[in-house]
Image (spheres, rainbow, N blue to C red):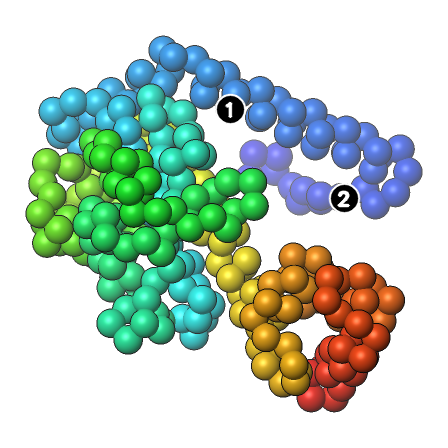
């Protein structure tokens, strides 16, 4: 090595050196935030990024609207959802974000990744599925078909799929089957940050310092965050509903009230009898039934 001898690395665990290390980490984090903010706020840098993407992907125009999709589910495929995030002029537009619950032909979901991508893109361009959610304050409003059509009327110039060539091919096939053409599709693979076009045998490699790659990464990472957040919400709801299945006298109305009051099964199990009785419509007897069921050996397993 360059030093010519062994090098030891020590990590401070306490005292002044620990405090110094923490300050250095905080300063570095703040500097990174400032750099990212300057790249987002600069119209020149955003224009450069979109032009780089357009040139690299062989597009006829810059991607003023970009939509990025990601799939999220448990290991066994349960609670399978997809996210759609939107970037316009290089800036994220959360009001345009959408969630999709993956159903499959049997209504259960648990599709393989390619099939889940196909269903998501096909539904997005068919405008016919009202089971799409908008990220608003309570994150629970179902978008009506008329509103969904209005929101989806503006087609993107570029669609990014979190994945590689096969995911991009599946997305393109879904668009063609939905009667849509003229939109560029690419996959962005996490491991090597390779950009894949559905009809190319080799990936496009953008420079690590490229503003275009940075924009693609931001869209991909945001879609992943959005998908994971919604997946966890669905999983918490599922766990709560499963716990209620064994409780007599607790129907959908009380499930919603308890979920609204406590937010998760974990928090519900922490609730005392007095806390449960604060929920509208739950008296002492019903509160005791819920409490006993949630703290029985069966519920604990």
Q: Disc 1 versus disc 2: distance between alpha carbons? A: 28 Å
Q: Quadrant of the C terminus?
A: bottom right
Check disc 2 and report the residue beneath it.
Answer: 11
Answer with mark 1 or mark 2, whichever residue precedes in sequence.
2
- Which class describes the residues within 10 Å of circle 1: few (<14), some (14-19), or many (20+)? few
Q: Is residue 18 visible?
A: yes
The front one of 13 and 219 is 219
Image coords of residue 232 (percent x, y) = 54, 59
Image coords of residue 46 (percent x, y) = 36, 18
The residue that appears at 83% across and 75% down in the rendered structure is 284
The residue that appears at 8% across and 47% down in the rendered structure is 179
Image coords of residue 112 (percent x, y) = 30, 68
Which element type, helix, strand or loop, lies under badge 2? loop
- Label 2 near label 1: C-beta < 8 Å? no
> How many numbered badges does the structure rendering display?
2
Q: Which mark is residue 100?
A: none
- List the single residue furthest toward the bottom: 298
Q: Is residue 80 above or below residue 153?
A: below
Q: Is residue 19 above or below residue 33?
A: below
- Tell me where residue 15 sits by quadrant: top right
The front one of 65 and 293 is 293
Q: Is residue 101 left or right of residue 16?
A: left
Which element type, helix, strand or loop, lies under badge 1? helix
The residue that appears at 68% across and 64% down in the rendered structure is 258
Image coords of residue 1 (percent x, y) = 55, 39
Check disc 1 and report the residue beneath it.
Answer: 36
The residue that appears at 45% across and 40% down in the rendered structure is 222
Q: Nearer the viewer, mark 1 or mark 2?
A: 1
Q: Is residue 122 left or right of residue 228?
A: left
Q: Is residue 270 visible?
A: no
- Which class describes the residues within 10 Å of circle 2: few (<14), some (14-19), or many (20+)? few
- List the single residue furthest toward the right: 15
């Amino acid at each position: 090595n360059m030093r010519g001898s062994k090098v030891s690395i020590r990590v401070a665990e306490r005292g002044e050196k620990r405090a110094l290390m923490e300050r250095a980490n905080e300063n570095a984090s703040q500097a990174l935030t400032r750099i990212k903010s300057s790249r987002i706020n600069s119209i020149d840098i955003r224009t450069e990024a979109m032009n780089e993407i357009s040139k690299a992907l062989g597009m006829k125009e810059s991607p003023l609207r970009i939509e990025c999709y990601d799939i999220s589910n448990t290991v066994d495929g349960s609670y399978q959802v997809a996210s759609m995030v939107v970037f316009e002029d290089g800036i994220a537009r959360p009001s345009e974000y959408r969630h999709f619950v993956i159903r499959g032909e049997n209504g259960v979901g648990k599709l393989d990744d390619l099939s889940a991508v196909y269903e998501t893109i096909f539904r997005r361009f068919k405008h016919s599925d009202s089971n799409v959610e908008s990220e608003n304050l309570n994150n629970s409003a179902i978008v009506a078909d008329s509103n969904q059509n209005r929101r989806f009327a503006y087609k993107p110039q570029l669609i990014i799929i979190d994945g590689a060539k096969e995911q991009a091919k599946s997305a393109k096939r879904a668009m063609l089957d939905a009667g849509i053409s003229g939109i560029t599709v690419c996959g962005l693979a996490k491991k090597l940050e390779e950009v894949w076009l559905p009809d190319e045998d080799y990936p496009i490699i953008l420079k690590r310092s490229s503003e275009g790659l940075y924009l693609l990464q931001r869209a991909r990472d945001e879609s992943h965050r959005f998908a994971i957040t919604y997946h966890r919400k669905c999983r918490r709801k599922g766990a709560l509903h499963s716990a209620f299945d064994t409780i007599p006298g607790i129907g959908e109305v009380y499930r919603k009230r308890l979920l609204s009051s406590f937010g998760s099964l974990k928090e519900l199990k922490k609730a005392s009898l007095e806390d449960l009785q604060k929920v509208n419509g739950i008296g002492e007897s019903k509160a005791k039934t819920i409490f006993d069921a949630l703290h029985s050996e069966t519920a604990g397993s």
